[in-house]
Image (tube, rainbow, N blue to C red):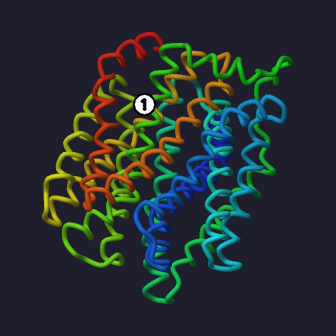
Amino acid sequence: MNNNKSLILLKLLPIMLAFFAMGFVDLVGIATNYVKEDFNLSDSIANLFTSMVFFWFLVCSVPTGMLMNKIGRRKTVVLSLFLTAVALILPLIDYNLELILISFSLLGISNAVMQVSLNPLLSNIVSEQKLSSALTFGQFIKAIAAFLAPIIAAWGALHYGNWRLLFVIFLIEGLIALITLWFENIKEEDISSHPSTFKECFSLLGDRVVLLCFLAIVCHVGIDVGTNVSAPRVLMDKLNIPLAQAGYATSIYFLFRTFGCLCGSLILAKWSTRRFFSISVCLLAAGMLGLMFFNTQTTLYICIALIGFNNANLFPIMFSQAILHRPNKKNEISGLMIMGIFGGAVFPMIMGIASDIIGSQNGAVAIMGIGVLYLLSIMSKVHDITKKSN
């Protein structure tokens, strides 16, 4: 029994290294703020860089689900790690808007491929009963990378005058993840002899449970990326402080998102999913209201922490419920759920326009509030999901 547990832990190590690399996509939040300052861009133009990253989730997710049916999940994850390495190398070659745009696009493509393939790959190692908790722990590992990104960027900027040292450090970890997973042997289900078509994949959105989970992920990621990008700007707007100081708001967000993922992996093993979901969404709403109306550093930090902690576990909850609802369509469902991450492209773009129009970051916060309202509206419907899936 102990040997079996040790074997599982050894197989989980390269998976968790890949989850850390999955967190690299969150560096675009703090990176966008540095690019905005370096090239003197407006909010709406700067947010287009962030939107470019998450736009690719809309384009690549479903095709990746179909690709997994042909080459398998592990090989698809390895491919994503290779693309991630290329994306991180480009800004080190030269620092201009064109290469940054290409780098961010490649980061979006690679992350879309990784998220579609890595989450269901985990289901080949852990049992269905532990999947939600294991996915949450993976999100905890991912959140560590997101938490470290603004700290490393600030350290590079303050001590070496180059925030792009962030790309060097993340590149090294990404290559380690690629090498370890390349040599790992993970048994997967037999690849379908009848690969799904685009029509068959998108027809799954006609399932009420799948659609509900999909829209929840759109809102969750929109709030996540929106807070990542806008939290420093809210502090700069309301407290009149420089970016180097305000950037730590992003670290606070990811610190509490990381803590939330860790707590969630433990709580979800004991609490009902629907109860945990409801409490998380209510506290998320409280944090968003405070971010709009409070004007002191302490209260704003508390609100950012509330948003980070309570938004942390919504993705693994909705993702696991969707694939457990239709276990015979894991690859296709995974592609659809990850496609919902394009909310990270839609929300920042609209947020940038709203903040430019009203001349305040409250416009951006109000757009995120729309996503929170949707999550509040489906709390009673989540009861049906958990009853049916469990």
- Between 21 and 348, the residue placed more toward the observer is 348
Q: From what the image shows, is residue 372 above or below residue 197?
A: below
Q: For the view shown, which residue lies furthest in the right direction?
A: 193
In the displayed structure image, the side of residue 49 where residue 225 appears, left or right: left
Q: Residue at x 28, y 28 (%)?
A: 376
Residue 32 x, y percent position in the rendering: 48, 66
Q: Mark yes or no: residue 187 visible.
A: no
Q: Amino acid at mark 1?
A: Ala
- Determine whether, in the image, residue 296 is placed left or right of residue 169: left
Going 43% across and 16% down the picture, which residue do you hit?
385
Q: Is residue 220 above or below residue 155?
A: above
Q: Quadrant of the N terminus?
A: top right
Residue 123 location (% of width, % of height):
63, 30
Left or right: residue 282 versus residue 24 is left
Name the residue nearer the viewer: 86 or 270. Answer: 86
Residue 226 seen: yes
Residue 104 locus on image (x, y percent): 61, 61
Relative image position of residue 331 (x, y in whole percent): 68, 27
Q: Which corner quadrant of the image does residue 207 belong to?
A: top right
Residue for badge 1: 216
Local SS, label 1: helix
Label 1: how many residues lie within 10 Å, few (<14), some (14-19) or many (20+)? many
Report the residue at 46% width, 48% height from top: 140
Which residue occupies the extreme front position in the image? 357
Question: Which of the two residues, 272 or 171, is positioned nearer the viewer here?
Answer: 171
